[in-house]
Amino acid sequence: MPKLKVLHVSLEGEKGVGGIKTAIKGLLPALARKDDLEIYLVTPFFDVYEAFYDSAVLTEVVKLKHVYDGQLHESMIYRTYVPAAEESKQVLHYLIRPAEGSPVRMLFDIKNEADMYKSFVWSEFQKRVEYFNSAVAAMVRLPNVEIPLFDVVHAHTWHAGLSICLMKEFHERQQPLNKIPHSVSSVYMLTAAEQGHLTTTDSVQALIDSVGLAEDFISSFPVEPYGFKLDSLKQAAVVLAYSDQVVIAHQGHLQDLISGKGEGLDALLIKLSAALRLTEIVTPMTTVSDEVWDSDPAQQYSALYSTVATQPLLTADQLRTVTDSSNPTPTATWIFDSLQVVKKALEDFEDSLCYTTRKKQTVKI
């Protein structure tokens, strides 16, 4: 039986500020030690990696085009291996940065890992999120012999999970696309400050325009219970809505989140739970032994990937409704127009690269 190829998407990897880095550094090697998985990681190519990885082990893989700030940009993808005790069980690490000569080359000029979530004059945090997630979506969906066909994409928190939305909304009429992979997203904490909340009309519209989402993206969501408004958008909610499976990484938090402690996302979390798209896997956020990772978290995640990969894919079109497993009647109207509208939108497309199958934001190649 072929191994499942699982791509982990994260702002943190071997470098980071704490809990997520610890989880990535513990979980991924443990998963790589399992015989049924091939594990990959993609992060931004922050300057801090220049000193961490010897340039001799960094390989330029491919240059790709993607949408950022409403325009077509080019990124270079590099490849190396995360250091591991067993050479045959290594994690392949992809790193993304703007191509040489890009006008936004300085976006990932972060020389101190403690600064990864900070904004600077030359690089705002939200802009880094938009650029990175857009590039990851293009990396996964645009065919290239140097990039594997991934079975599952696992995004770690909202600032890496926007890529799941863009993968499902990706449309490129000039060539066939890779299949949409199944998706898993991890929620490590869900405080009000950890939702990527955009609170003005300008900031919401800037995100939509930047990554090429449909002009009517917000209005296509029912306001209740998802809370999507033209002047208020929680990016964490977008990730929850698009993920095939959502993992709560702390013990006991699942019950809290569906019992009135969901920080404004309660109704959406309840819908996900009813549709069996919400699960709890305790994921250590502090350093623990390999034996701990191997014996429990890696076992549970491996089983989850196998289950998710064999279930029907929740594509952008199919996410219009969510069905309670105990009730075959659709329990919520979701985000997309009828298939007839989708077909009409496709007919109206000129050759362009964008992230929607409904209403175009054209960017000429």
Image: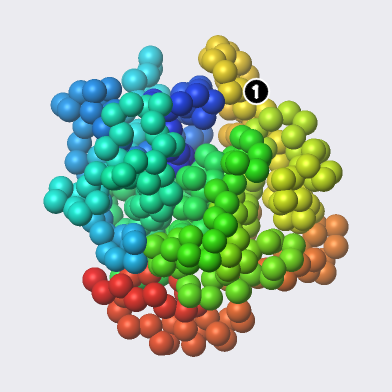
At which x and y percent is residue 34? 51, 27
Q: Residue at x 25, y 59 (%)?
A: 73
Task: List the residue tagged with mark 1.
Answer: 296
Q: Quadrant of residue 211?
A: bottom left
Residue 277 seen in this snapshot: yes
Q: Residue at x 15, y 48 (%)?
A: 100
At which x and y percent is residue 137? 40, 55
Q: Amino acid at mark 1?
A: Asp
Position of 362 compared to 312: left or right? left
Residue 244 seen in this snapshot: no
Packing grade of label 1 (10 A; few <14, some 14-19, many >=20) is some
Q: Residue at x 34, y 34 (%)?
A: 93
At which x and y percent is residue 157? 55, 41
- Residues 333 and 89: in front is 333
**Vertical comparison of 214 with 338: above or below:** above
- Residues 25 and 1: in front is 25
**Vertical comparison of 67 with 113: above or below:** below
Position of 311 compared to 30: left or right? right
